[in-house]
Amino acid sequence: MTILLTTLNARYTHASLGLRYLLANMGPLQEQTKLQEFVIGAKTTEIVERILARQPRIVGFGIYIWNVEETTKVVAMLKRVAPQVVVVLGGPEVSHEPGEQQIVQLADYLITGWGDVTFPKLCGEILNGPKPLMKIHAGVQPPMAEIKLPYSLYSDDDIKNRTIYVEASRGCPFKCEFCLSALDKTAWPFNLDAFLAELEGLHARGARLFKFVDRTFNLNIKTSLKIMQFFLDKLAAYPDDPVYAHFELVPDHLPDALKEGISKFPPGALQFEIGIQSFNPAVQTLVSRKQDNQKAADNIRWLTTQSHAHMHVDLIAGLPGEDVASFARGFNQLWALHPHEIQFGILKRLRGTPIIRHTEAYGLVFEPYAPYTILANKDIDFPTMQRLVRFARYWDLVANSGRFAHTLPVLLGESAFEHFMDFSDWLYANTDATHRIALDRLAAMVSKWLQTRGMSKAAADELLASDYAGRNESGSRIKPAAANTPAARAETAAPQRQARHLAA
């Protein structure tokens, strides 16, 4: 084995699609190339030892915002104990602003952008000459038809135990300045027939969890319908062994034909991730995000009332031009639409994104280390931003966990953001913790909070028992009007396969 492809995944269940693309496109060097994945949190010495046990001449690292700090330590140690091993970096985190990154200084070579063609070419030159003179190589973007699809490289163990990531297209036509896809010129589709044939092969091998990484799955409705029909056909053919598919949707583009297709999916088979990010038109304009807010709201309302899709909707706090009052209005507006989850994100400065152009005018201050979370801006000072960070963490524990489905509407009342912020401030003051809060303790604290708001202990404990004792972990939110009815509980209980996916 001559070339080792590796990365540190955020979790074991995350299989690296990028590395498998590289392996699939190694050409004559494929037989000399192996793939080895690790998980963040592993000991640096053990990672280096396992890499060197493979005796590689070249090690290619996939670098992302979540693994750059730990991978920097790995590369530093690797170059100390085995300086003869050539280290090549690639991935979104090192594709921009490389001059100031320690990991780039430690490495021998860097490929920015697309690596499908450039990585095997660089490896060939390193191994066979002439030796490359330049350290940084701009990735060449090949025609989509020339990229070999990697799905046969998912192992049987991957299919059995991990989420299978797939993509029908790359890129994005939108220019949202907080996203790296803002640098793309457009979206480039893969050949649909070839892609569906790969899905067929994965399904035949036992794959049932498919997570699409396309930024704009519903951009081309004809393509979307054909892909969804693939899954509908599998659901019909294998009702006792159903598939589960995850797509990222553009929120304001849901024509009737797509609604008709979505409405055919049974519970537990479909999840949508929808990025709203902000409902403030001025903020949207400032960060170059084009979105029809009324259409987006109408579509989310339709999806929650007329489909069985699990809804995961994103908001970002800390965007330039949005103060806490504006964010609160957007949060309350989204809560009123009843998505199953609200992913409360805090703005991060991804390297290369245009959001940095607002730094001076809006006083953007970001953490200097990955993941470069915003610390303050001219509208939200540092202490307030930390309150929002805690709100986001507690929201995951209480709301998005699905464990407090009956209690949550009572806790939030008619002012969801304001009431949960009050609870968040109180919880932090009384626990001094945002992590490692045991479920028993969390339930007790929620009960205690309700008592401070006028509820009797018996009533609060009874309400909590309807959630906590029953371990309602489906991730689905029971709507306030029907929170305690048996029909509502049955309706929101997620099938086992959906629960497994949400846990991942």
Image (cartoon, rainbow, N blue to C red):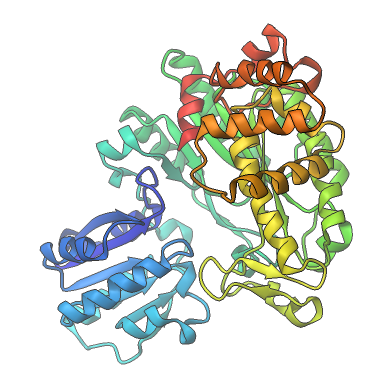
Q: Position of residue 499 (x, y in %)?
A: 50, 27
Q: Residue furthest bottom?
A: 133
Q: Nearer the viewer, residue 110 or 390?
A: 390
Can residue 250 be spotted in the picture?
no
The part of the image, by quadrant, that contains residue 462 is top right
Left or right: where 45 falls relative to 9: left
Give me the residue at 65% from left, 42% from top.
Answer: 395
**Residue at the top extreme?**
486
Q: Position of residue 378 (x, y in %)?
A: 81, 73
Residue 222 occupies quadrant: top right
Residues 56 and 48: in front is 48
Q: Is residue 33 left or right of residue 136?
A: left
Q: Is residue 22 placed above or below 404 in the rendered structure?
A: below
Is 391 situated above or below 227? Answer: below
Where's residue 311, x and y in %? 66, 34
| The one of 242 and 98 positioned closer to us in this rendering | 98
143 lies above or below 200: below
Query: Residue at 79% of width from left, 23% of height from top?
Result: 455
Quarter of the image holding residue 473? top right
Residue beneath the point at 86% across and 48% down? 329
Q: Position of residue 464 (x, y in %)?
A: 64, 21
Q: How many numbered discs, if any? A: 0
Residue 353 seen from this side: yes
Q: Quadrant of the C terminus?
A: top left
Quadrant where the N terminus sits is bottom left
